[in-house]
Amino acid sequence: MTDADNDIKKIQQRIKESLLLIFTSESDDASDKIWLIENTSNDRLKQLIPKLSVLSLHTLEIISQNEGIKGIDIAQKLGVTKGAISKVTRKLLDYGLIRKEQRPTNLKEIYFYVTPLGAELSKLHQQYHLELDKKSFELFRSYDLSSLELVADFLEKLARLR
C-alpha cells in the first residue's frame, strides 16, 4: 500500500467516524425532547413529548405538511416500512396528535390529519430544526462554494454505493 493509499484510508476512517456520530446523534432524541419541553408552555405536550420517538415527530411533521396523506406515502417519504408507520400512527392517534379518516368509497385506505395539538407540536418541532439549521448554516458559510459542492457531490455518490 502506498503512502497516498494510507492517507486515503485515514481520511476514509475520519469520514466514517463523523458520519456515525451524525447518525447516532440524529437517532438520540434526548436533545430534541429537552428542547421541545423547554420551549412549550403546553402542559399536555410536556407530558407527551417524553413518550414520542424521533420517527413519531417526523411522521407528525409529514402529516402536518401533507394533510390527508396515506400511511404508505408517509413511509415512502421517511424511507421506513409501512409497518413502522402503522405502529407510529397508532400511538399518535392514541395521544390525540392526529386523526384518521376513511372515504366511503374505499374503506381500506386511511387518511391522516393533524389535530390542533398535533399541529402545535409539529410547529414546535419545525422550530427546533430551524435552530439546528441556523447553526449548521454558519458552519457552511465558513467554506467556499466549490468546497461545499465537492462535499455534497461526494456524499451523494457515497449514498448511492449503499
Image (cartoon, rainbow, N blue to C red):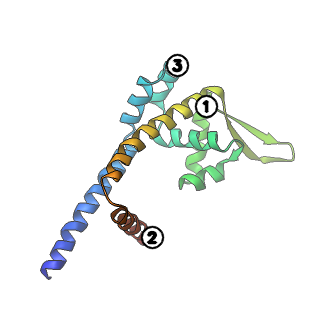
- Judge the density around disc 2: few (<14), some (14-19), many (≥20) Cα neighbours within 10 Å: few
- Judge the density around disc 3: few (<14), some (14-19), many (≥20) Cα neighbours within 10 Å: few
- Whole-number angstrom distance, CA of label 2 to CA of label 3: 42 Å
Kindly identify the residue that appears in the image at 15 percent across and 75 percent down.
Answer: 6
Mark 3 highlights which residue?
Answer: 42
Q: Secondary structure at mark 2?
A: helix
Q: Amino acid at mark 3?
A: Asn
Left or right position of 35 against 103: left
Mark 1 highlights which residue?
Answer: 119
The percent position of residue 41, horizontal first and vertical second, equals 49, 18
Q: Nearer the viewer, residue 92 or 135?
A: 135
**Which of the two discs, 3 and 1, labels the residue nearer the N terminus?**
3
- Whole-number angstrom distance, CA of label 3 to CA of label 1: 13 Å
The percent position of residue 3, horizontal first and vertical second, equals 12, 79
The percent position of residue 10, horizontal first and vertical second, equals 18, 67
Name, please, the residue furthest toward the left.
3
**Which of the two discs, 2 and 3, labels the residue nearer the N terminus?**
3
**Which of the two discs, 2 and 1, labels the residue nearer the N terminus?**
1
Mark 2 highlights which residue?
Answer: 160
- Whole-number angstrom distance, CA of label 2 to CA of label 1: 34 Å
